[in-house]
Amino acid sequence: MRPATLPSRPGLWKSGTVRCRQRETPTGGLLAVAVAAAALASSACAKSQTDVLTLVSADATVPPILILRVTVAGATGQSMGSLRSMAVGDAADRPAPFSFPLSLPVTADPTLAGPVTITIDGLDWDTYAVIASGSAPAQVVPEQETAAAVTLAAVPGGAGADGGTPDAGAGASDAGGDL
């Protein structure tokens, strides 16, 4: 999966463009090798990316998310990657949370061609525990862009689900005035 670049506007993430560099032609007997290498490089760059443009939204129960983990799983295997919010955050070197909905281009390995499941997990910044999750079916078509939509929902009991408030009865001391 290729990482997303800075948003062009809040909530919209798009991928960067891969550009090919032309090689300088060496002189002498290496000319044929350079021409063959340039032909291979240009044909490799002529191929289109295999992307699933994924619209990611979050329901009202989802806490602020700073890290997303994306998994694409199909019959022939799976690929996984993560993405950190690039929005300017606080002084503790934490980014601001993602703004939803966001458009996330997920680059898939062409060998995963066919039906896949895209799973997106929101991770807690400090513990990397899953605090929100969602998945959706999609199609991977080699060298083409397809689309999918995933809605995140809070994971019950996930870190940060209750704002860090200790649960009653979970080892809390008695603050009552028993006499």
Image (tube, helix red, strand yellow):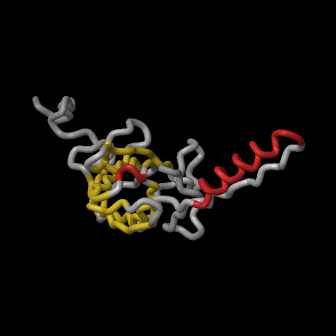
Q: Is residue 154 above or below residue 34?
A: below
Write the residue at 30% across / 58% down: 114
**Location of residue 132 in the rendering, given as x and y in whole percent from the top left corner:** 30, 52
Write the residue at 27% across / 54% down: 154
**Location of residue 141 in the rendering, given as x and y in whole percent from the top left corner:** 38, 62
**Location of residue 88 in the rendering, given as x and y in whole percent from the top left corner:** 59, 55
Is the C terminus in the top left, top right, bottom left or bottom right quadrant? top left
Q: Is residue 162 visible?
A: no
**Location of residue 85 in the rendering, given as x and y in whole percent from the top left corner:** 51, 53
Q: Nearer the viewer, residue 121 or 167?
A: 121
Residue 157 as seen in the image, left or right of residue 149: left
Residue 102 as seen in the image, left or right of residue 9: left
Q: Is residue 26 above or below residue 49?
A: above
Q: Is residue 44 visible?
A: yes
Residue 35 as seen in the image, left or right of residue 119: right
Q: State which quadrant residue 173 falls in.
A: top left
Q: Nearer the viewer, residue 147 or 120?
A: 147
Q: Residue furthest left?
A: 179
Write the residue at 33% across / 44% down: 78
Residue 59 as seen in the image, left or right of residue 93: left
Write the residue at 52% across / 63% down: 13
Q: Nearer the viewer, residue 39 or 179?
A: 39
Q: Is residue 32 above or below residue 113?
A: above
